[in-house]
Image (cartoon, rainbow, N blue to C red):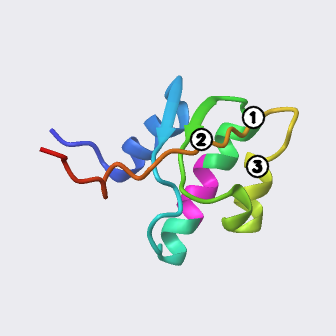
Amino acid sequence: QSESYDQTFKRLLEVKLLVLDDLGAHRSSDWAEEKIYQLINHRYTTRAWTIITMNGKPSDLEDRIASRLTFTELSEVYKVEAPDFRTLRPTS
């Protein structure tokens, strides 16, 4: 039996460690942006472990989301500079 959307969203809110990969890479609907905000805000207020990867800076995101990611008492931002491995071609 498959989970309902609400059940899945609740699991995302409560999972011990959540990884959001490539946040902000795609244009989202207003509904999707709201759900991302609700998810990040809930995890922020409950101090739940969350890892977010993105190609840009937190300031590239909507202000209310960026503010949750850059509050220095609860979060750490690491800049990792590396080539885009998707564009590298094999040398052989």
Mark 3 Cα-neighbour bin, 10 Å: few <14, some 14–19, many ≥20: some
* SS state under label 1: loop
Q: Is 92 drawn above or below residue 87 in the view shown?
A: above
What's the CA distance linking mark 2 and mark 3? 20 Å
In which quadrant of the rendered view does residue 75 lie? top right
Which residue sits furthest left?
Answer: 92
Secondary structure under badge 3?
Answer: helix
Q: Which residue is mark 3?
A: 68
> Which residue is located at x 76 percent, y 49 percent?
68
Q: Position of residue 15 (x, y in %)?
A: 49, 28
Q: Are marks 3 and 1 in contact (CB under 8 Å)?
A: no
> Where 66 falls versus 21 (above or below)?
below
Real-space Cα separation, disc 1 to disc 2, in angstroms: 13 Å
As shown in the figure, which amino acid type bears the numbered disc 1? Glu
Q: Look at the image and give the residue range highlighted in magenta.
A: 34-39
- The Cα–Cα distance between marks 3 and 1, rounded to whole angstroms, is 11 Å
Label for residue 80? 2
Residue for point 62% across, 54% down: 38
Instruction: State which quarter of the image contains the N terminus.
Output: top left
In the image, is residue 38 part of the stretch drawn in magenta? yes
Q: Amino acid at mark 2?
A: Val
